[in-house]
């Protein structure tokens, strides 16, 4: 972008903060997602984070669908291993906390990442594992009740929550060196018999 980068970024910030037209929001989100997925050196992580934090103003525009799209982008960033423990995610903490308190975008997905962070940072391993296990148990009970009543969108939502909780739990076990429990957790998540068998062979060396 060269010397024109600053003018472009300044214009984007002005549009995000001051434009009353929500029709420009999907364009802003698509530009940000492309920058993040391409991992280009420019704009810098600091510049990307600044714009993304400014986009928290979407909460005030009263459009839940656009806000959900924005929070989904934030969630994808925190779930990406390439951005784990980076300055980029540190600067996005205000947007992450917004996701934790918004009900429409599955706040459990944000909270599960938060629980995993607390376990690693403050050595709260036992508490974090117990909380994640409770999430798994609650989702299983919910799915059983939903099957007895009707099939609806909540089942898809709860399935996603279970996947996120299971992955977070497996990662904590891996961090602790509990390899047997780690493999067992992933074998429970496998969809194919061949995958289960391969994990079993790898587990026993």
Image (cartoon, rainbow, N blue to C red):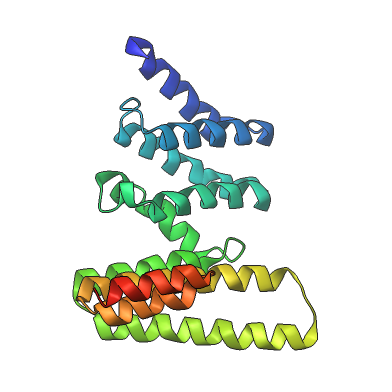
Q: Residue at x 21, y 76 (%)?
A: 176
Query: Which residue is pictured at 57% across the width and 50% down the height?
Result: 59
Q: Is residue 59 above or below residue 22?
A: below
The answer to whether 43 is drawn above or below residue 75 in the figure is above
Residue at image position (43%, 76%) is: 187
Instruction: Name the quadrant of the C terminus.
Output: bottom left
Is 73 on the left or on the right of 159, as rendered? left
> In the displayed structure, would residue 104 be above or below residue 10?
below
Rendering coords of residue 197 (x, y %):
42, 74
**In the image, is 184 to the left or to the right of 17?**
left
Q: In the rendered image of this protein, does residue 173 appear above or below residue 52?
A: below
State the residue in front, 69 or 39: 39
Extreme residue toward the top, this view: 3
* Viewer-side residue, 33 vs 189: 189
| Residue found 29% across the figure and 75% down from its top | 203
Q: Is residue 111 visible?
A: yes
């Amino acid at each position: 972008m060269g010397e024109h980068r600053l003018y472009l970024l300044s214009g984007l910030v002005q549009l995000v903060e001051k434009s009353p037209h929500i029709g420009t929001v999907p364009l802003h989100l698509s530009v940000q997602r492309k920058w993040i997925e391409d991992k280009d050196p420019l704009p810098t992580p600091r510049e990307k984070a600044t714009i993304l934090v400014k986009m928290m103003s979407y909460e005030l525009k009263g459009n839940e669908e656009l806000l959900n799209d924005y929070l989904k982008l934030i969630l994808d960033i925190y779930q990406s291993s390439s951005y784990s423990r980076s300055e980029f995610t540190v600067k996005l903490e205000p947007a992450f906390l917004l996701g934790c308190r918004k009900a429409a975008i599955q706040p459990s997905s944000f909270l599960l990442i938060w629980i995993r962070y607390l376990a690693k940072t403050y050595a709260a391993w036992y508490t974090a594992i117990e909380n994640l296990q409770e999430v798994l148990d609650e989702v299983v009970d919910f799915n059983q009740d939903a099957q007895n009543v009707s099939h609806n969108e909540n089942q898809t939502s709860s399935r996603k929550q279970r996947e996120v909780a299971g992955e977070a739990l497996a990662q904590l076990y891996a961090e602790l060196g509990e390899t047997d429990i780690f493999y067992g957790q992933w074998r429970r998540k496998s969809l194919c018999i061949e995958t289960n068998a391969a994990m079993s062979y790898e587990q026993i060396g």
